[in-house]
Image: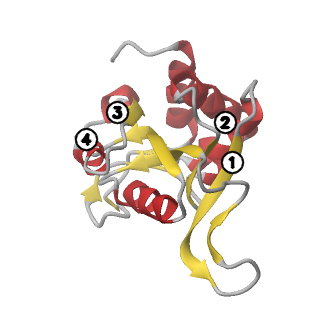
């Protein structure tokens, strides 16, 4: 196991106890097959788990960030947890998968505006495609993406490379070996 912060250790314990499934095979959102699956929502949507997640995000977040969010639904509870736990003004937002044709329309939801410096978050990545899509949507709206943070990076470097091509640094809080599984 890598050298983890106390909050990251708490995150591992919560994820393993509540969201890690090792009785695969499972088909991942990327289309890849895996012997294990992490249902991060069992932690991110849980009160105590959400507080742990918020603390973990705040330990590594770019200190110039004004808002945090990403693709709905995976990023939503992570962003809200970070904003609620923060001891400084930090807003949460969502990026819709498709543009909404009614109401205010568009793909961005929440208090994020052109010129904001934001961090894109996700619970688990296999390729980084969803995070890259969120970055592109935000940039089209004039939002400055300064960082990306993922709770568990199972991409073996693919997500970091995808985001590096967009000039967005990725911070991976955990990797599969931290959970006791192999990539």
Front label number (3 vs 4): 3
Q: Is residue 114 left or right of residue 21?
A: right
Q: Do callouts 2 and 4 mark residues in contact (Cβ within 8 Å)?
A: no
| Numbered disc 3: secondary structure | loop
Question: Callout 4: few (<14), some (14-19), or many (20+) C-alpha neighbours within 10 Å?
Answer: some
Of mark 2 and mark 4, the one earlier in the sequence is 2
Residue 118 placement: quadrant: top right
Residue hosting label 1: 92
Of mark 3 and mark 4, the one earlier in the sequence is 3
Q: Do callouts 3 and 4 mark residues in contact (Cβ within 8 Å)?
A: yes
| Numbered disc 2: secondary structure | helix
Q: Nearer the viewer, residue 183 or 104?
A: 104
Front label number (2 vs 4): 2
Front label number (1 vs 2): 1
Residue hosting label 2: 82
Residue 183 drawn at (x, y percent): 25, 41
Residue 168 drawn at (x, y percent): 37, 43
Mark carried by residue 175: 3
Of mark 1 and mark 4, the one earlier in the sequence is 1
Mark carried by residue 183: 4
């Amino acid at each position: 196991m890598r050298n983890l912060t106390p909050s990251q250790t708490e995150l591992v314990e919560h994820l393993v106890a509540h969201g890690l499934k090792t009785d695969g095979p499972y088909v991942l959102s990327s289309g890849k097959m895996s012997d294990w699956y992490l249902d991060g929502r069992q932690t991110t949507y849980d009160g105590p788990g959400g507080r742990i997640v918020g603390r973990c995000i705040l330990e590594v977040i770019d200190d110039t960030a004004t808002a945090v969010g990403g693709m709905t639904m995976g990023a939503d509870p992570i962003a809200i947890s970070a904003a609620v736990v923060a001891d400084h003004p930090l807003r949460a937002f969502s990026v819709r998968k498709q543009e909404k044709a009614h109401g205010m329309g568009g793909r961005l939801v929440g208090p994020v505006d052109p010129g904001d410096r934001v961090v894109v978050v996700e619970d688990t990545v296999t390729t980084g495609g969803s995070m890259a899509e969120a970055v592109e949507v935000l940039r089209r709206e004039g939002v400055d993406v300064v960082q990306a943070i993922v709770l568990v990076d199972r991409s073996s470097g693919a997500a970091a490379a995808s985001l590096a091509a967009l000039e967005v640094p990725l911070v991976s809080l955990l990797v599969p070996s931290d959970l006791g599984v192999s990539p």
